[in-house]
Amino acid sequence: MIDMKNIIERYRGNYIAEMRKDVGHAPLMVISCGVIIENDKGEILLQKRRDNGFWALLGGSMEIGEKFTEVVKREAFEEAGIEIGELTLFGIYSGEDGIITYPNGDICYGTGIVFKTTVYSGEIQNNTEEALEHRFFDKTNLPDNLNKYDKRVIIDWTKDFQQVIVD
C-alpha cells in the first residue's frame, strides 16, 4: 500500500524545489496567489523583485495544503514583513501570460488568484530575501517596468472594476 502521507510530507512547505529535483527546468503548473494592497490614498503597494528587477504584486506559489488566503498572508509577511487582513477576491487569471521563465531557466504556468485589501499592519521592510524595495504607486504614476505576470492585474486595478475578474 502506498503511504500517501509520507509522500505528501516530502513536498509540504517546499513543493516547487522538491518537484525541480524530479523534473529539472521542465514546465510546472502552479497556483499563484497575489494581493493588491492599497493604502489610505488608494495607492497600490508594489515590490521590486530581487530576481528580475521588475515591479510586481506581493504573492507567490501555493504550498500543498494551504488555503488561498493563507498563501497571500504568508507571502506578504515573507516579502514585506507585514500582516494583512480582510481580503476580498479581485480576480482569477489564466492564459499565455501566465507562462513564466525564471532567470535560472525554470518554467512555470501559473493560474493566478488575486485578492485585494486595505488592511495591513507592521512596518514595510525593504531589501528582503525576495524584494529589493517596496513602494506605493498611484494609478496614474505606475513604473514602466512592471512584471509581465502581474501587469494585466495591475492595469485592471487602475480601471476600478466593481466585479470579480475571471479571465
Image: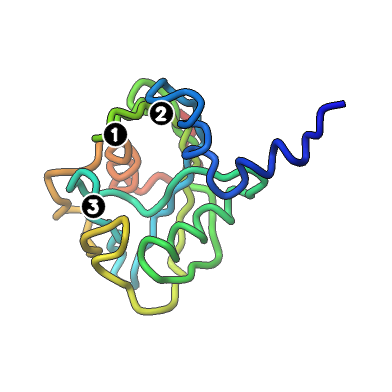
Q: CA distance from mark 1 to mark 2?
A: 8 Å
Q: Quadrant of residue 44?
A: bottom left
Residue that numbered label 1 is attached to: 102
Q: CA distance from mark 3 to mark 1?
A: 12 Å
Q: Quadrant of residue 6?
A: top right
Q: Residues within 10 Å of mark 1 (few under 14, many from 20)?
A: few
Which residue corresponds to the image point at 70% horizontal and 36% vertical from the top-left? 7
Three-letter code, disc 1 = Tyr
Q: CA distance from mark 3 to mark 2?
A: 18 Å
Which residue corresponds to the image point at 44% horizontal and 27% vertical from the top-left? 94
In the depicted structure, whether residue 105 falls above or below residue 34: above
Q: Quadrant of residue 167?
A: top left
Tell me the tag on residue 115: none
In percent of width and height, residue 57 lies at 34, 51
Q: Nearer the viewer, residue 78 or 149?
A: 78
Which residue corresponds to the image point at 28% horizontal and 41% vertical from the top-left? 155
Which residue corresponds to the image point at 40% horizontal and 44% vertical from the top-left? 161
Three-letter code, disc 2 = Cys
Q: Nearer the viewer, residue 28 or 39?
A: 28
In the depicted structure, whether residue 128 falls above or below residue 59: below
Does the CB distance between marks 3 and 2 fall below 8 Å?
A: no
> Which residue ends up furthest to the right in the rendered image?
1
Residue that numbered label 3 is attached to: 50
Q: Nearer the viewer, residue 18 or 131?
A: 18
Three-letter code, disc 3 = Arg
Residue that numbered label 2 is attached to: 108
Question: Callout 1: helix, strand or loop?
Answer: loop
In percent of width and height, residue 32 lies at 47, 40
